[in-house]
Image: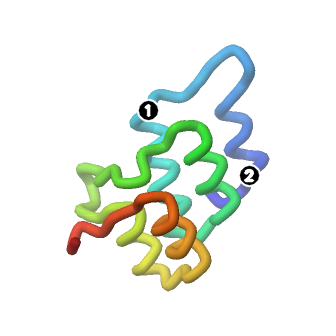
Amino acid sequence: MGMRFEVLEFFPDWARPEQDQIDAAFWHACRGGRVVVAIFLFDQGADVNRVPAWAPLTPLDAAYLGGRGELIDWLSAHGATSCGG
């Protein structure tokens, strides 16, 4: 999910992905440190604190695992929290 133009293909003018798909893509973008993609998905309504069933981590936790400082700062500024508090 690091390629912004590939992500845009899932948002045609006539359709929209389901919320679960947006949230999952956002989580993966955060884990992979893809700032531009994460911001785009946030603008599309991604839940900044959604914990997926398959990984007991928030997007902020995922960004911490990847050591993504810029993304950690951005997430924190947009209300992201950690599972640890």
Q: Point out residue 32 in the picture as x, y percentages from the top left corner.
A: 55, 69
Question: Is the residue marked by circle 1 packed among few (<14), some (14-19), or many (20+) residues within 10 Å?
Answer: few
Amino acid type at circle 1 is Gln
Q: Residue at x 41, y 80 (%)?
A: 65
State the residue in front, 63 or 78. 78
Q: Which residue is mark 2?
A: 4
Residue 19 in the figure: left or right of residue 70: left
Structure colour scheme: rainbow
Question: Is the residue marked by circle 2 packed among few (<14), some (14-19), or many (20+) residues within 10 Å?
Answer: some
Q: Point out residue 53 in the picture as x, y percentages from the top left corner.
A: 24, 50
**Looking at the image, residue 22 lies above or below residue 3:** above
Query: What quarter of the picture does the N terminus occupy?
Result: bottom right
Circle number at residue 19: 1
Task: Identify the secondary structure beneath mark 2.
Answer: helix
Residue 81 in the figure: left or right of residue 19: left
Amino acid type at circle 2 is Arg
Q: Residue at x 59, y 24 (%)?
A: 16
Name the quadrant containing residue 20: top left
